[in-house]
Image: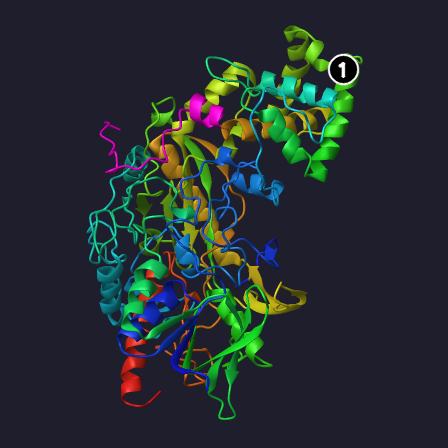
Amino acid sequence: MATVYDVVVVGSGAAGGTMAAHLARAGAHVAIVEGGPKINTRTDFPTHSMPWEFANRQIPKMKPGKPGMESERARGLGGKTLTWNAVAWRFGQRDFKGKTFDGGGENWPIDYADLAPYYERIEREVGVCGNYDGLEDLPDGVFLPPAPYKCSDKLIDKGARKLGLKTIHVRKATLTQAKFGRPGCHYCGNCMAGCDVVAKYNSYDVHLLPAMKTGKLEMIPNAVVREVMTGGDGRARGVKFLHRETKAEGEVLGKSVVVCCACVQSVALLQMSAKDGLANSSGQLGKHFIPHFTGGVEAFLDGLVGAPLKDDEGFLDHAYLPSFMHERKRDYFRSFGAQFGYQNRRGIGWARETPGMGAGYKKAVKDQYPAFVVFSPYGEMVPNAKSFVDLDYGKLDQYGLPSARRQVTWMENDWKIFKDMQNWSKEILLSAGAKIQKVWEEPRTNHELGGARMGNDPRTSVVNAYCQTHDVKNLFVLDGSVFPSASEKNPTHTIMALAARTAEHMAERAKKGEL
Amino acid sequence: MAERRDALKIIGSISVTCAFPFAADELYAQHEGTHGAISGQAALPEPVYFSKADFATIAAIAERIIPATDTPGAGAAGVPAYIDFVVGRNPAQQKVFAKGLAWMKKQTKGRAFGQLGEKEQLAILEPLCARCDAGPVKGKGERFFKALKALTSDGYWTSKAGMGETLGFNGNAILGSYPECLHEH
């Protein structure tokens, strides 16, 4: 007879990895089902490659012959945490209750106080570096020492201060000193190619592998889930999958199912699982899609033009400009924050646009090289009816499954934020002393959020405050899709804290025989 | 809330993971599906896509854009082979190059570009370069020069000679601690 697991977790990234490890440690028999292969983070990523090793001068995602990270539905055990930038903010109370604060968007059904203990649990478990800044809007946590500022950060901070603003040390789930049997960061500057020593958190090495020792966790890689199965009683009973390579069909059965295969893919999986979408009596599934939008201003800092080159790529960005407009007079809802300098020095596309030719051009590029910086502000999108996720049956992927289609329309409020954040980025750079190279004219999406939003009212939301679907009691959705509002802050830490909270809730309910 | 008239609608797959965007995007699209390895960076290897004559012209122009100084120039950095590799896989670029090379032959009255003296070469290239720097380009010669400069730039600055020797790239090392900035900025 087929094994019936206590919990089947679909997806092995930040949410799935946290969820599965916490549940297994609580004694539940857990299967984690991942579309991609097992990846050896120590050997399979081209972490220390340089562009000239490849004909097209582009460092590939995986070393030649190593599978993984190749398609949206099949990435690898560890999901996007394998190649993320590890920024780890706690949301503040304003992020959970934005509607109360400024009238726009939607509130979360939980408060900062509900999630604070779980943020702390994650910080103590995975290691987050940062400074104690005492900001109400960006609550402090339990931190390892921050990474020092770069030269460019100091210049930008000085420019920001002249305008009455302040930057802070970035907070990342990257170890700045050895801990948990993992080494500290060695600052090779290529975090997003995959960290080969696990100084940077990834869910496979930090959550899943240790949890295997419980004997309660089974990893099922290469299984592209195509459907959450339900029984005659309307309860979820497991998942159907296709093998990543052979496309052979299979099933994994469970008493509960947790869908956490990344925002858009989670929504798409529920949409594929029933005619009008599983757990969609509200009709809200796929709606309120609110990815972050980014701007960008590229510049050369005067203070570093012609400076001797330093090996200071570090772990990419070391500083951050926290949101400040939310407490100022403005003509829009919500606000923005800005990362800067998260490019390493291995891409030099800007040199195309350096004027001239000959020895003069060559010298100009060399002089500008240490001074290049990109300011990347992130804005919060307010939900609108024209931004949603649906399925495109006209476009089937390699598994014969409909593509998940993202529809994004930026509205007046989004454009106002975008223009303001671009202006501020320029002003700060100019105040720091810089020559502006390029200003993006249009927003680009990043950090996908929304589509299965959380709320207390089953008529207007898909899941409740514990990420349990209103319609199917033993089905949970857990990733960026449940965010009712996006904040302007990078979302992963909040996703992991939600996963820890939901795992604890499920374990307690299971003990009482309620699941 | 009123919808902005020029609100941008994006349908289908958009790149959303937190990646390195910016100018490199263009590079990525252009190079899609072109993994493989270029063997040894010899002085002027056999072209795969271009004719020998065209390849020599491209190499000569690339060397004018990034000449050898106290560090290697475009030729020694293997830029001509890189351009051959990229254009050979990009039909849009092929048109620009074909028109541009034909235009160039008219300018040199049939002589090989590489056989012209330095002054003659620069007399053709420098005005083109100035017009490209001035703003949007239309003419065949300008479009050709702009594309060739872009590829020369990409190829050179990502080569070991360009990034390593000329720019002095010194990263990608295993550091015991982060080299904090101690300057008075």
* Residue A116 sits above or below residue A339 on the image: below
**Residue plotted at (57% across, 30% down):** B39
Residue B81 image position (x, y, % from top left): 62, 28
Give residue A47's quadrant in the image. Answer: top left
> Viewer-proximal residue, A4 or B147?
A4
Identify the residue at the far bottom of this view.
Answer: A233
Give x and y (percent) for residue A165. Answer: 29, 44
Rendering coords of residue A183 (x, y %): 25, 48
Q: Is residue A410 left or right of residue A467?
A: right
Relative placement, left or right, of B38 versus A186 is: right
SS at mark 1? helix
Pick whichever, B69 or A120, lies toward us: B69
Q: Which residues are magenta?
A: B160-185
Using the rendered image of the protein, determine whether residue A318 is visible from the camera's viewpoint. Answer: yes
| Colour approach in the figure | rainbow
Residue B175 drawn in magenta: yes
Q: Residue tagged by mark 1? A: B107
Tell which of A392 and A353 is nearer to you.
A392
What secondary structure is the magenta-colored segment mainly?
Answer: loop
Are there few (<14), some (14-19), or many (20+) residues within 10 Å of tag 1? few
Q: Is residue A281 visible?
A: no
Kindly indicate the quadrant of the structure image that contains residue B102: top right
Q: As displayed, is residue A170 above or below residue A463?
A: above
Chain letter behind tag 1: B
Q: Quick check: A481 above or below B12? A: below
The percent position of residue A224, horizontal first and vertical second, equals 53, 68
